[in-house]
Amino acid sequence: MWGYVLGAATIFGLIVTLGTWLNGRMTRKIALQHFERIEQYFEKSDRRFEELLKEIRRSSEESNRRFEELRKELNKTFEETSKRFDELVKQHNELIRQHNEILKGLTTRR
């Protein structure tokens, strides 16, 4: 009878050992596949981030170029406006001078 018990325990032990060994191999295989997928995801993410950085740099350079063009246009417009304003000030001063002469002429005739 002990022979049957020991034989059954041995067979049970072999079955459990075989099951554990197979389970460990399957778990290792699944874990390796998972890590490979994660590595591929990170590589894809790195490539996408590099593309985004290139696009941001290109966009920034384009924005800087456009800003510089607008700054030049604004400076030109400001200079033109300043010249026109100076002309208007001269005209205004001339009108005030003429007005003062007319007032002076009117006050001396009385």
Image (tube, rainbow, N blue to C red):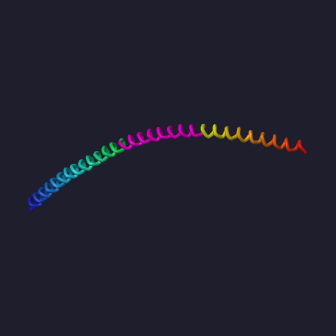
Q: Quick check: 12 left or right of 102?
A: left
Q: Tell me, yes or no, whether the highlighted magenta stretch contains residue 52.
A: yes
Q: Give the residues drawn in magenta, as a range.
A: 51-78
Report the predominant secondary structure element of the magenta stretch. helix
Residue 79 place in picture, x, y as percent:
60, 37
**Which part of the image, by quadrant, shows the N terminus?**
bottom left
Task: Name the foreground residue: 99 vs 92.
Answer: 99
Residue 97 place in picture, x, y as percent:
78, 39
Q: Quick check: 33 left or right of 75?
A: left
Task: Name the foreground residue: 43 vs 89.
Answer: 89
Picture residue at 11% right of the left edge, 57% below the top: 11
**Which part of the image, by quadrant, shows the C terminus?**
top right
Q: Quick check: 83 left or right of 51?
A: right
Picture residue at 35% right of the left edge, 42% below the top: 51
Q: Which residue is farthest bottom?
A: 1
74 above or below 9? above
Q: Quick check: 88 left or right of 18?
A: right
**Residue 56 placement: quadrant:** top left
* Mark count: 0
**Residue 80 placement: quadrant:** top right
**Residue 81 placement: quadrant:** top right
Q: Tell me, yes or no, whether the highlighted magenta stretch contains residue 98.
A: no
Task: Name the foreground residue: 44 vs 101.
Answer: 101
Residue 65 place in picture, x, y as percent:
47, 38
Q: Which residue is farthest front?
A: 109
Residue 3 place in picture, x, y as percent:
8, 59
Picture residue at 85% right of the left edge, 41% below the top: 105
